[in-house]
Image (tube, rainbow, N blue to C red):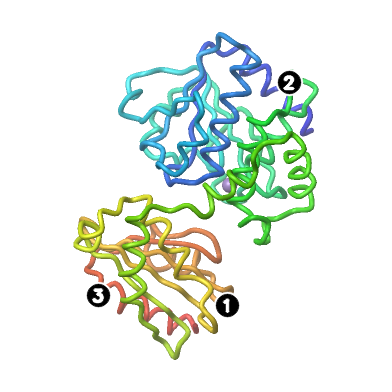
Amino acid sequence: MFKEKLKILHDLVENASSVLITGTKKEDADSISSEIALSEIFKREFSNKKVDIVNENEIPGKFKFLLHNVNIFTFEEKKSEKYELGIVVDCGAERSGKVKELFKKCKYKIKVDHHSFGNEGKYDLELVFTKVGSTTEIIYHIVKSEYWNVSLDKRLAELIYGGLIADTGSFQYDLTKSSSLRICAELIETGFDFTKTAELINLVRTYEMKKLLGLVLCNMKMDVDGNVVWSYITKDMISETGANESDIGDIMDELCFIKNVEISMLLVEEDGGTRVSLRSKGRINVGEFCKNLVSTGGGHPRAAGCKLNMKIEDAKNLLLNNLKIAGV
Ligand SMILES: [Mn+2]
């Protein structure tokens, strides 16, 4: 079944005059690595094929090292383009933001994903496997497939590894599968600089992010009998430190893993309200919690978010009250 799908994928790409690759609107190393890896594979197999990666926004600076000679276009640059085949990775097309408009117009549609949710929409081919660590783990199987004349080299190994360490938390989270570790051994055997890849994805952050982090940690408060820790980022804090959207995304990770704390919460001031990110140690399913709070909210059981059309202070009170009701 899986093998057959890899053959169909090959045929669909071979017969398409042009290919659009897109992924999740939010910045995500697995999604970006998968996009770049697929484009590399397609261009090696079919050298004259038009293959464009298009995302709603520009790729975050910290992931630019993955590009090498590949270009990722923004939606603005390609909004009037037409593609015959559309491929969405690491999510359903509905999560690709504005690029969804381009995707909808494609004659053939493919999804390559490892999520169990977001399966609405119709695709001509679904390479969806939920028992793997990352979408790049699925791409590894494309590279190894007998239908594709592409070999696993340092370049593809770096990309597959990038997605794997991002989604498995460097093989710490429960997304880690024994298959992920076996594949990883083979990736390392290609001789790519895996310590550099891990450092750039997991550790290197901007000076501005660290400055903003300092303010966020100073403002951190404990609530609900010590079960919830929360902090916030105002527009003033962003302009004071010069931090950007990508820096803000990295801050949430630093509010987690506090001893005896069940929920970590970050509130970010935005036009028209407050964006909230929540992380749970497991007692509360924050994906469900956010969805129940506001219809546009949601995410994973342990990591989720929502946008509330109120000021930070009011959003914080609403969230703390609802977390109490939820039994945190
Ligand atoms: Mn993923």
Task: Say which label, 2 or 1, has the lower sequence index.
Answer: 2
* Residue sitting farthest toward the bottom: 225
The residue carrying mark 2 is 148
SS for callout 2: loop
In this rendered view, identify the residue nearer to me: 92 or 121.
92
The residue carrying mark 3 is 314
Which residue shows up at 41% across the image and 71% down it? Answer: 265
Near mark 2 (Cα within 10 A), the count class, few <14, some 14-19 or many ≥20, is: some
Q: CA distance from mark 2 to mark 1?
A: 45 Å
Q: Position of residue 158 (x, y in %)?
A: 63, 37
- Tag 3 and tag 2, C-beta contact below 8 Å: no
Q: Quadrant of the N terminus?
A: top right
Image position of 40 (left or right of 314): right
SS for callout 3: helix
* Residue sitting farthest toward the top: 48
Q: CA distance from mark 3 to mark 2?
A: 55 Å
The residue carrying mark 1 is 283
In this rendered view, identify the residue nearer to me: 159 or 291.
159
Amino acid type, label 3? Asp
Amino acid type, label 2? Trp
Which residue shows up at 43% across the image and 84% down it? Answer: 324
Image position of 202 (left or right of 144): left
Near mark 3 (Cα within 10 A), the count class, few <14, some 14-19 or many ≥20, is: some
Q: Position of residue 84 (x, y in %)?
A: 50, 17
Q: Position of residue 249 (x, y in %)?
A: 40, 55
Q: CA distance from mark 3 to mark 1?
A: 24 Å
